[in-house]
Image: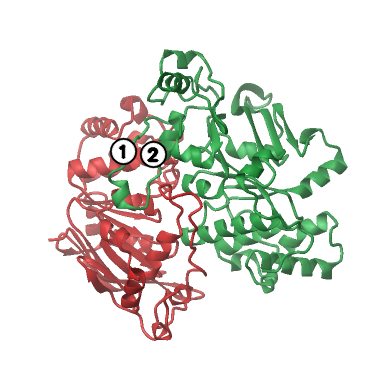
Chain colours: A red, B green
Amino acid sequence: MALLEVKGLGLEFSSPGGTVQAVNKISYDVEPGEIVAVVGESGSGKTAAALSILGLVPQPPGKIVAGEISFDGQNLLDLSEDEMRRIRGRRIAMVFQEPMTSLNPLLTIGRQLTEAMRLHLGLGKAAANDRAVELMNMVGISDPQRRLGQYPHHFSGGMRQRVMIAMVLSCEPELIIADEPTTALDVTIQAQILSLMQDLTEKLGVAMVIITHNLGVVARYADRVNVMYAGRIVEHGTAVELYRNPAHPYTIGLLNSVPRLDRPRGSPLEPIPGNPPDLTALGRGCAFMPRCRFATPACGEATPDLQDVGGSHVAACWELEKIRSGKAA
Amino acid sequence: MTMPSPLPSVSQSPIGALAASKPLVEVDNLKVHFPVRKGVLFQRTVAHVKAVDGVSFSIRRGETLGLVGESGCGKTTIGRTILKLTEPSGGAIHFDGADIWDLGAVDTAAFRRRVQAVFQDPYSSLNPRMMVGDIVGEPLLVHGVNPIAADRAAAVRELLEVVGLSGAMAGRYPHEMSGGQRQRVGIARALALKPEFIVCDEAVSALDVSIQAQIIKLLEDLRDEYGLTYLFIGHDLSVVRHLCHRVAVMYLGKLVEISDSDTLFENPQHPYTKALLSAVPIPDPDVERTRPQQVITGEVPSPIDPPKGCVFHTRCPIAVDGCRQETPRLQQIEDEHWVACSEIHHEAQGTI
């Protein structure tokens, strides 16, 4: 059984400009020990979807209008805030993008790192402290006893993100949701943090949902990938299926618009024209249609559902046949 | 595309022709040290942050030089110093033969017309209270190019069209535009005075992938159309490689390697360059999962008290005792390829 199953999740925000359909009937699952990526650009709904799993979407203005989030057989949307609090941080933990703002500047690292363990695991002060030292070692912070007494401003960005990971691991969660965990970090530090997270998921058997816009990071670390556009999942598959044989025009466009170090210099970039759509005014057709080079008038009539493209690979596009034969030709 | 008329149109020069042309920008042993002050009433200088510490390079006319490195390595400070926004503590910068820190008021005004900047964050680099037309037209007004409002409006419309926006957008405010559109406004403003040289400081870093490609393409088209020279500061190596003829790699205020793009990316020599390249993930699981990875440990040391000897020795996989004593100088190992690493030199001599 899947550890996490998101089924037909719909999330709306009410704003003065109209209702924003941030997440539109998305479904995906995560198996124990697996790394699943959610890829998409700003405003595609990837973070909003993740926050709904943890019950962290402010309601109002947010409103979950449809679907179910089943974690270990339990629908998280049915739980009370008290019950949710026992799961959040304990069984599902989250790493946020900004290591600079997700730690409290007024509390020592030790205090922040032990808080969850004392709360969730009921550890005493000394036991929590010992465990904190162990965790700091695990994430590669030297001289942990001294560092625990310091404040966040004594730590660099990379070190703070390590502290965040130690914190997330402290209660041995079954699922980690990492929202752009390395976007704010330099590339060499990004590589360190991601390898660390990958090692730890392998060693501890933790499942991970990684939310990112970096297609390279996905290729290196993810087992399976969901591509989101305008609140919907438009393509899903294993990383290998998806990169070898992208089916949705948006995925194809994304892959063609990043310069690659392993291709000859001067290979032309093919940007996706236009801008992402206004989520308050989505028509009834495919949201990608205005930017799509394969679009036909029929694409404006109805939104395509996900269809099989072989293996576990699915894509939501009316013109899949044409695109596939076009690529073969 | 409509062009604002008198910008010189230059056909794209091949690298060979570039090599022969005279440098437009020469940076010579540049040092920028910021004082660290302490004390409430009487601020004493207790130390210096050596943001840039003895950097030399030149940029030829029509060339795009990439400047890469991690946060805090001094790349933005170099850009600001070339723009005459930050005063150097030592060394000199020449633009078209003249020392930019030695110009009179009239020459400085002329210099500011010839050199422009495009910044990273399209949200904070445009004044939210000004309409797009006024933002793009402001340089024309300040420098007295189009003192008459109607002329200026026409010039602004033309500029907006050059960067792929419609002339009607002149009447909008920045908050009515997307990130990509705002960055186009920033580029239109930089082009207004028909500059020769543009410093692009992380100009595409804040943009989404699909929009980033649009802006990279625009920068390329403008460069070819108007023969612009760019200093492209960035940390995304795949973007830098795509856009730049030559690339300089910085670490902790020093230049560690500089070369033409192809050589640098195919045959990197400095251990830091190698580590940087290996840290960039390639969007292809087949390539990515078979590629050897070289993750360097540790973090960048403080520029207040940089390591003695080679600044990279604390994280370097091939450092020897000598690296802790002696600061390596840039040495030429090929035509266009310079590296500051004493171990590389020995290695090269040993194997060739």
Circle 2 SS class: helix
Please state the horizontal and vertical placement of residue B87, each as a whole percent of the image. 72, 33
Q: Residue furthest left?
A: A1
Q: Quadrant of residue A163?
A: top left
Compared to residue B175, the image places residue A290 above or below, namely below
Q: Chain of mark 1?
A: B
Q: Using a 10 Å C-alpha cutoff, classify the residue at mark 1 as few (fewer than 14 neighbours), some (14 to 19) or many (20 or more).
A: few
**Amino acid type, residue under disc 2 in the picture:** Ser
Q: Quadrant of residue A152?
A: top left
**Side of B177 where A118 appears, left or right:** left
Determine if marks 2 and 1 fall on one subunit.
yes
* Distance of label 2 from label 1 (alpha carbons): 8 Å
Q: Which residue is mark 1?
A: B292
**Amino acid type, residue under disc 1 in the picture:** Pro
Q: Using a 10 Å C-alpha cutoff, classify the residue at mark 2 as few (fewer than 14 neighbours), some (14 to 19) or many (20 or more).
A: some
Q: Which mark is residue B334?
A: none
- On the question of residue B36 being in view, the answer is yes
Circle 1 SS class: loop
Q: Nearer the viewer, residue B165 or A247?
A: A247
Please state the horizontal and vertical placement of residue B348, each as a whole percent of the image. 45, 23
Q: Quadrant of the N terminus of chain B?
A: bottom right
Q: Chain of mark 2?
A: B
Q: Which residue is mark 2?
A: B278
